Amino acid sequence: MQKFPTALSMSLLLGLMLTLSCSSELVGEPREKRQADKLHITLLYESLCPDSRNFMHQLGPVHEELQQYMDIQLVPFGKSRSEQSGAIFHCQHGPAECEGNRVQSCVISSTANQSAQVKFVVCQMFALDSSRADQCASEAGLRTDVDHCADSESGTKLQLQAELVTKLYQPSFIPTIVYNGVFNQQLQDHSLRDFRGTVCHLLRQQNLLPSGSPVCQ
């Protein structure tokens, strides 16, 4: 298994210190959902973004292995933007992506089970379009009326919420991975190359792994 490099640059160490020092000021998620004994991760992505899809190859297995140490927030919006209070959405990869973002928001919001959320998103991201949403939801153990949500005001509100969270970080690249509510470019770069290694490094830094734990070895 890959490990996070032990010889970290001074800039990464300084950035990491900033991230950890601000961990009590998380944004984008209700305070009651934050768990002090977990690493908080916010993933900003788009439903039809090739780079987002590539990242799912890492997200799936890493979350399956380390989910008990992770508190993840999935935000399908990316470089989209809304007009007229959500009457119109413009998405980087066209209308189909707007539909995909909306569908994913609906399914994600239907459960608090993060394992199911991740399983659904990984499945859906490898589909050619949103037509497999019901199948992916079923495979993740979810029962939800995707079409009703996506075609209603509920879907609009969920995407407006996703837009607000995304704007907090003003991402220049999608996907963007945020730890403990603070964006750090060095952690972002490392995450895209080695998500598992980055997560394991932060878990050790925050003393979130039990003493002598074989996790992340």
Image: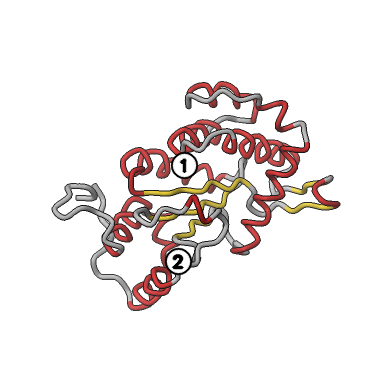
Q: Residues within 10 Å of mark 2 (few under 14, many from 20)?
A: few
Q: Residues within 10 Å of mark 1 (few under 14, many from 20)?
A: some
125 and 107: which is toward the camera: 107
Amino acid type of the residue that numbered disc 1 sits on in the rendered structure: Met
Circle number at residue 165: none
* Colour scheme in use: secondary structure
Name the residue rendered at 16%, 55% in the picture: 211
Q: Say left or right for 154 vs 71.
A: right
Residue placed furthest toward the left = 212
Name the residue rendered at 28%, 56% in the picture: 208
Residue 17 sits above or below residue 206 on the image: below
SS assignment at label 2: loop
Q: Say left or right for 101 vs 217.
A: right
Q: Position of residue 170 (x, y in %)?
A: 62, 64
CA–CA distance in space, label 2 to label 1: 28 Å
Q: Which residue is mark 1?
A: 56
Q: Position of residue 5 (x, y in %)?
A: 27, 63
Amino acid type of the residue that numbered disc 2 sits on in the rendered structure: Ser
Name the residue rendered at 51%, 48% in the picture: 73
20 and 194: which is toward the camera: 20
Q: Position of residue 203 (x, y in %)?
A: 30, 57
Q: Earlier in the sequence, mark 2 or mark 1?
A: 2
Among the 4 quarters of the image, the one containing residue 94: top right
Q: Which residue is mark 2?
A: 24
Residue placed furthest toward the front = 32
